[in-house]
Protein backbone atom coordinates (compact mmCIF):
# COMPACT_ATOMS: atom_id res chain seq x y z
CA UNK A 1 0.00 0.00 0.00
CA UNK A 2 2.81 2.44 0.84
CA UNK A 3 4.40 1.74 -2.56
CA UNK A 4 1.10 2.63 -4.24
CA UNK A 5 0.90 5.87 -2.23
CA UNK A 6 4.50 6.71 -3.12
CA UNK A 7 3.79 6.16 -6.83
CA UNK A 8 0.63 8.25 -6.62
CA UNK A 9 2.48 11.06 -4.81
CA UNK A 10 5.27 10.88 -7.39
CA UNK A 11 2.81 11.27 -10.26
CA UNK A 12 1.13 14.23 -8.54
CA UNK A 13 4.49 15.91 -7.97
CA UNK A 14 5.50 15.24 -11.58
CA UNK A 15 2.26 16.78 -12.88
CA UNK A 16 2.71 19.82 -10.64
CA UNK A 17 6.33 20.23 -11.75
CA UNK A 18 5.33 20.06 -15.42
CA UNK A 19 2.63 22.72 -15.00
CA UNK A 20 4.89 25.82 -15.35
CA UNK A 21 6.27 24.54 -18.67
CA UNK A 22 2.79 23.58 -19.94
CA UNK A 23 1.41 26.98 -18.87
CA UNK A 24 4.30 28.76 -20.57
CA UNK A 25 3.88 26.72 -23.76
CA UNK A 26 0.20 27.64 -23.84
CA UNK A 27 1.12 31.31 -23.36
CA UNK A 28 3.81 31.03 -26.06
CA UNK A 29 1.27 29.48 -28.45
CA UNK A 30 -1.44 32.10 -27.94
CA UNK A 31 0.73 35.19 -27.30
CA UNK A 32 3.61 34.55 -29.69
CA UNK A 33 2.60 32.04 -32.37
CA UNK A 34 -0.97 33.21 -32.89
CA UNK A 35 -0.59 36.96 -32.24
CA UNK A 36 2.56 37.07 -34.43
CA UNK A 37 4.12 40.26 -33.11
CA UNK A 38 1.06 42.52 -33.08
CA UNK A 39 1.28 44.81 -30.01
CA UNK A 40 -2.40 45.74 -30.01
CA UNK A 41 -3.54 42.13 -30.36
CA UNK A 42 -1.21 41.11 -27.51
CA UNK A 43 -2.58 43.91 -25.30
CA UNK A 44 -6.15 42.73 -26.01
CA UNK A 45 -5.18 39.12 -25.24
CA UNK A 46 -3.46 40.17 -22.00
CA UNK A 47 -6.55 42.11 -20.94
CA UNK A 48 -8.84 39.16 -21.74
CA UNK A 49 -6.56 36.77 -19.81
CA UNK A 50 -6.17 39.13 -16.84
CA UNK A 51 -2.39 39.36 -17.27
CA UNK A 52 -0.79 42.33 -15.47
CA UNK A 53 1.65 44.62 -17.27
CA UNK A 54 5.32 44.30 -16.41
CA UNK A 55 6.61 47.71 -15.41
CA UNK A 56 10.12 49.01 -15.87
CA UNK A 57 11.36 46.89 -18.76
CA UNK A 58 14.17 48.36 -20.81
CA UNK A 59 13.40 48.42 -24.54
CA UNK A 60 16.15 47.79 -27.07
CA UNK A 61 17.98 50.88 -28.34
CA UNK A 62 15.72 52.58 -30.88
CA UNK A 63 13.01 49.99 -30.32
CA UNK A 64 10.09 49.24 -28.02
CA UNK A 65 9.01 46.59 -25.51
CA UNK A 66 5.85 45.48 -23.69
CA UNK A 67 5.51 42.69 -21.14
CA UNK A 68 2.86 40.82 -19.17
CA UNK A 69 2.94 38.47 -16.17
CA UNK A 70 1.19 35.14 -16.86
CA UNK A 71 -0.41 32.73 -14.40
CA UNK A 72 2.72 30.63 -13.80
CA UNK A 73 4.82 33.69 -12.89
CA UNK A 74 6.61 33.72 -16.25
CA UNK A 75 6.61 36.84 -18.43
CA UNK A 76 5.45 37.32 -22.03
CA UNK A 77 7.59 40.02 -23.68
CA UNK A 78 7.18 41.54 -27.13
CA UNK A 79 10.11 43.66 -28.33
CA UNK A 80 10.68 45.59 -31.56
CA UNK A 81 14.25 45.97 -32.82
CA UNK A 82 15.35 48.30 -35.62
CA UNK A 83 17.61 47.02 -38.40
CA UNK A 84 21.32 47.22 -37.67
CA UNK A 85 23.15 50.20 -39.15
CA UNK A 86 25.35 47.90 -41.23
CA UNK A 87 22.25 46.27 -42.74
CA UNK A 88 23.30 42.76 -41.73
CA UNK A 89 20.46 42.30 -39.23
CA UNK A 90 16.94 43.15 -40.42
CA UNK A 91 14.36 44.94 -38.30
CA UNK A 92 12.55 42.32 -36.27
CA UNK A 93 10.00 41.68 -33.57
CA UNK A 94 10.79 39.11 -30.88
CA UNK A 95 8.13 37.53 -28.72
CA UNK A 96 9.41 35.63 -25.70
CA UNK A 97 8.08 33.80 -22.69
CA UNK A 98 10.76 33.75 -20.02
CA UNK A 99 11.14 33.03 -16.35
CA UNK A 100 9.81 29.51 -16.90
CA UNK A 101 10.68 27.18 -14.05
CA UNK A 102 11.65 23.91 -15.68
CA UNK A 103 12.75 20.35 -14.99
CA UNK A 104 14.68 17.74 -16.96
CA UNK A 105 12.71 16.63 -20.00
CA UNK A 106 11.65 20.12 -21.11
CA UNK A 107 13.03 19.34 -24.59
CA UNK A 108 10.35 16.70 -25.23
CA UNK A 109 7.59 19.04 -24.05
CA UNK A 110 8.80 21.87 -26.30
CA UNK A 111 9.29 19.46 -29.26
CA UNK A 112 5.60 18.49 -29.01
CA UNK A 113 4.45 22.13 -29.37
CA UNK A 114 2.20 22.35 -32.45
CA UNK A 115 3.36 24.91 -35.01
CA UNK A 116 1.58 25.27 -38.35
CA UNK A 117 -0.41 22.09 -37.69
CA UNK A 118 2.51 19.80 -36.81
CA UNK A 119 4.68 19.13 -33.77
CA UNK A 120 7.73 21.38 -33.68
CA UNK A 121 10.05 18.39 -33.53
CA UNK A 122 13.59 18.22 -32.25
CA UNK A 123 15.50 21.48 -32.30
CA UNK A 124 18.90 21.94 -33.86
CA UNK A 125 22.00 23.24 -32.14
CA UNK A 126 22.67 26.70 -33.60
CA UNK A 127 25.81 27.74 -35.43
CA UNK A 128 28.05 28.54 -32.48
CA UNK A 129 30.01 31.11 -34.49
CA UNK A 130 27.00 33.45 -34.34
CA UNK A 131 25.95 32.77 -30.74
CA UNK A 132 27.71 33.64 -27.51
CA UNK A 133 26.55 30.92 -25.14
CA UNK A 134 27.65 31.22 -21.50
CA UNK A 135 28.54 28.08 -19.54
CA UNK A 136 25.45 26.29 -18.22
CA UNK A 137 23.22 27.52 -21.05
CA UNK A 138 21.80 25.32 -23.79
CA UNK A 139 20.11 26.69 -26.91
CA UNK A 140 17.94 24.85 -29.44
CA UNK A 141 16.62 26.52 -32.59
CA UNK A 142 13.90 25.80 -35.12
CA UNK A 143 13.90 27.64 -38.47
CA UNK A 144 10.37 28.02 -39.83
CA UNK A 145 9.37 28.26 -43.50
CA UNK A 146 8.26 31.90 -43.14
CA UNK A 147 11.75 33.03 -42.08
CA UNK A 148 11.01 33.21 -38.36
CA UNK A 149 13.11 31.31 -35.86
CA UNK A 150 12.12 29.78 -32.53
CA UNK A 151 14.73 29.62 -29.75
CA UNK A 152 14.57 27.61 -26.54
CA UNK A 153 17.26 28.70 -24.09
CA UNK A 154 17.78 26.65 -20.95
CA UNK A 155 19.85 27.74 -17.97
CA UNK A 156 20.54 24.52 -16.04
CA UNK A 157 21.98 26.12 -12.90
CA UNK A 158 18.75 28.07 -12.34
CA UNK A 159 16.24 25.53 -13.78
CA UNK A 160 15.12 28.33 -16.09
CA UNK A 161 13.80 28.24 -19.65
CA UNK A 162 13.06 30.98 -22.18
CA UNK A 163 11.12 30.41 -25.40
CA UNK A 164 11.24 33.06 -28.10
CA UNK A 165 10.39 33.59 -31.73
CA UNK A 166 11.98 36.17 -34.02
CA UNK A 167 9.81 37.66 -36.76
CA UNK A 168 11.93 39.48 -39.35
CA UNK A 169 9.99 42.59 -40.42
CA UNK A 170 12.32 43.63 -43.24
CA UNK A 171 15.25 42.29 -45.23
Image: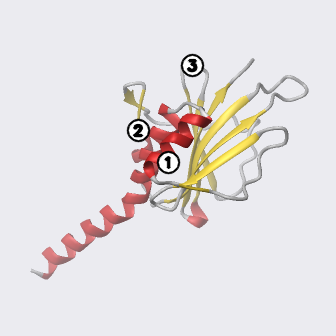
Q: Is residue 82 above or below residue 134?
A: above
Q: Which is more foreground, mark 3 or mark 1?
A: 1
Which quarter of the image is occupied by the N terminus?
bottom left
Residue located at (31% from left, 69% from top): 13
Q: What residue is drawn where x is 59% and y is 66%?
A: 158
Contact flag, marks 1 and 2 (Cβ < 8 Å): no
Q: How dense is the environment of label 1, judged by Cα within 10 Å: few (below 14), some, or many (20 and up)? A: few
Q: Which residue is mark 2?
A: 113
> Cα distance, mark 1 to mark 2?
24 Å
Query: Which picture quadrant has residue 6?
Result: bottom left
Compare marks 3 and 2 and give the one earlier in the sequence: 2
Q: Residue furthest right?
A: 86
Q: In the image, what residue occupies the spot 30% across and 62% down? A: 15
Identify residue for label 3: 146
Kindly report the distance in space between the C-alpha atoms of the residues bearing marks 3 and 2: 17 Å
Which numbered mark, 1 or 2, is in the foreground of this view?
Answer: 1
Direction from residue 6 to residue 136 in the image, left or right:
right
Q: Which mark is residue 80?
A: none
Q: Residues within 10 Å of mark 3 (few under 14, many from 20)?
A: few
Under circle 1, the secondary element is helix
Q: Is any atom of residue 124 visible in this view?
A: no
Q: Which residue is mark 1?
A: 47
At mark 3, the secondary structure is loop
**Tag 1 or tag 3, which sits nearer the N-term?**
1
Mark toward the start of the polypeptide (1 vs 2): 1
Residue 106 percent coordinates (x, y): 44, 52
| Residue 104, horizontal then vertical, whole percent | 44, 58
Residue 90 location, x and y as percent?
77, 25
Q: Looking at the rendering, in which quadrant would you find the C terminus? A: top right
Amino acid sequence: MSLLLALLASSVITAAQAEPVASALTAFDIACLRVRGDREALAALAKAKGWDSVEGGSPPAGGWQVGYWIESGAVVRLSGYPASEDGLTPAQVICAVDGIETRPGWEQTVSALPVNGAALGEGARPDMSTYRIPPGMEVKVWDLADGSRIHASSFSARSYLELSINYPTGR
